[in-house]
Each structure stands twice: as C-alpha cells, then as structure tokens.
Image: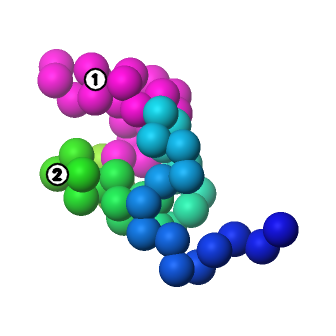
Amino acid sequence: MADNLDRKNPQDSSRINIHEPYELKWWSEELKISKEELIAVVERVGTSAESVKEELKG
C-alpha cells in the first residue's frame, strides 16, 4: 500500500519515524525543536516518543 501523501500527523504517535518527511515536520513542530535536533535525539535514544521527550527534558 502506498504512503498517504496527504497525511499530516504520525500514524503511530508512540514512535517517531524520522524517515517520513511529514512525521519529521510534525514531530519537530510538536516538540518545538529543529528537524536536525530531532534526528540527533532519535539517533541517540531511539524512536520511542516518550524516550525522546524525556531526553529533551534533560
């Protein structure tokens, strides 16, 4: 099945998929960080949205 190019928010809100442009945009706006910072955090702690949020809290 092809990706829905009209999609605006994540398909699975518990995971961050940095390989989908719409998810990268949505999550970076949601977390108020740059796309580059989001990629770096995901690479450091994994794709769990909760893990990423915890990492950003410091």
Colour treatment of the image: rainbow
- Residue 6 seen from this side: yes
Q: Amino acid at mark 2?
A: Lys
Which circle marks residue 32 in the picture? 2
Q: Secondary structure at mark 2?
A: loop
Q: Quadrant of the C terminus?
A: top left
* Residue beneath the point at 63% across and 74% down: 4
Residue 57 within the magenta-colored segment of the rendering: yes
In this picture, which residue range is highlighted in magenta? 38-58
Where residue 49 appears, x then y in whole percent?
41, 32
Q: Amino acid at mark 1?
A: Glu
Q: Secondary structure at mark 1?
A: helix
Locate residue 8 relative to residue 29 in the image: left or right: right
Considering only order in the chain, which callout, 1 or 2, is on the residue closer to the N terminus?
2
Locate residue 19 relative to residue 16 in the image: left or right: right
Q: Classify mark 2: residues with Cα within 10 Å, few (<14), some (14-19) or many (20+).
A: few
Q: Main secondary structure of the magenta part?
A: helix
Locate residue 16 relative to residue 58 in the image: left or right: right
- Residue 43 seen from this side: no
Residue 51 within the magenta-colored segment of the rendering: yes
Pointer 1 residue? 55
* Residue beneath the point at 37% across and 24% down: 50
Where residue 7 appears, x then y in whole percent?
51, 71
The quadrant in which residue 3 appears is bottom right
